[in-house]
Amino acid sequence: MPVDNEIYNRPGDIWWDESQPLSAIRTAINPARIEYFTRVLRKLEIDPAGRTVVDIGCGGGLFAEDWARMGAHVIGVDPSGSSLDTARRHAAAAGLNIDYRQGSGETLPVEEGSVDIACCVDVLEHVNELDTVIAETARVLRSGGVYLFDTINRTRLSKFVMIKLLQDWHFTAWMPPNLHAWEQFITPEELRDAMNRHRLSAGGFVGIGPGVKPLTLIRLTRQLRKGRISHGEFGDRARFVVTRDLRVAYAGYSTKSA
Ligand SMILES: C[S@@+](CC[C@H](N)C(=O)[O-])C[C@H]1O[C@@H](n2cnc3c(N)ncnc32)[C@H](O)[C@@H]1O
């Protein structure tokens, strides 16, 4: 079964409402993303303030808003019109100025060489044409620009955690069915090869995983399944951290060569 990207067109706020599964992205994963990406940018001596950032596959703007708060000029691109409606409404209510555009990673509605930072989080495993998305990302980045990403590795462990535990098994699943398809997960080697083909030199990879022990995670999952905590609270308590284990989720960066 391929991934079901229609999930993102569901009516209502599927992103910021803490009773919705996707809201856990903000509380669980965004702090680790910010920590790692900030570390990378500091190492590259790039201050995001005043820079142009494109958030590819921005969804409801959960991460785009973090970039805007860091003072960047943010362009958020996503194929889903209803997700963009939510993103626009939320940014307006938060007093943030973000330029949301409908489009896909395969054909970005962004001018060539106009972007300092391209960010693509939790998206590459949802696209049909990985190589085209990487080529487009390289096209819109200026020379020396940075690509920041996270995605899911295609390993036995990721099949167990992301597909069996979180989607398939009745007693543990809390993510929508077909949110992810194991066959569409990407190994770091495949991603590195794709980036190399398009003048993006890989800088490094790190793992991203729960900051609590497995038993605590199981307890939190049970509380979530029984409705005792919201998805937002679950994310808060399972708070992901940067690790050395790339077997499930990983993040990384590359820079565009001249
Ligand atoms: C799991 S969500 C991640 C959203 C956001 N990046 C975040 O982390 O909060 C995946 C997003 O990828 C978008 N998407 C699916 N196919 C895409 C494509 N070909 N190009 C760009 N975005 C795509 C979906 O509409 C959805 O908003």
Image (cartoon, helix red, strand yellow):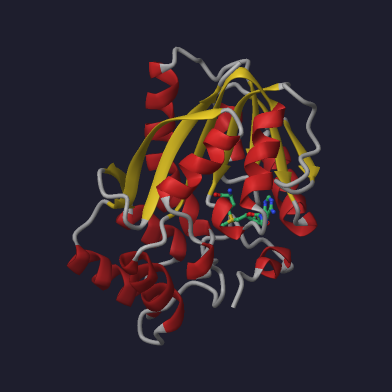
- Expressed as whole percent of the image width and height from the top left, the position of residue 210 reads 30, 55
Residue at figure coordinates x 55%, y 42% from the top left: 194
Percent position of residue 183, x then y: 51, 68
> Quarter of the image containing the C terminus?
top right
Q: Relative to 28, does residue 93 appear above or below in the rendering?
A: above
Q: Residue at x 34, y 48 (%)?
A: 208
Residue closer to the observer: 250 or 32: 250
Residue 18 % position (x, y): 52, 61
Q: Position of residue 250 (x, y in %)?
A: 39, 47
Q: Is residue 134 left or right of residue 190?
A: right
Q: Nearer the viewer, residue 105 or 227?
A: 105
Q: For the image shown, how many numbered marks are present on the structure?
A: 0
Residue 164 visible in the displayed image = yes
Q: Along the horizontal axis of the image, is 23 left or right of 241?
A: right
Q: Nearer the viewer, residue 95 or 177?
A: 177
Q: Quadrant of the N terminus?
A: bottom right
Q: Is residue 226 left or right of residue 146?
A: left
Residue 112 lies, with reference to residue 217, above or below; the image says above
Is residue 227 among what the camera can see? Answer: no
Residue at position x 34%, y 73% in the image? 160
Task: List the single residue furthest toward the top.
Answer: 45
Q: Is residue 137 above or below residue 177?
A: above
Where 167 sits versus 152, above or below?
below
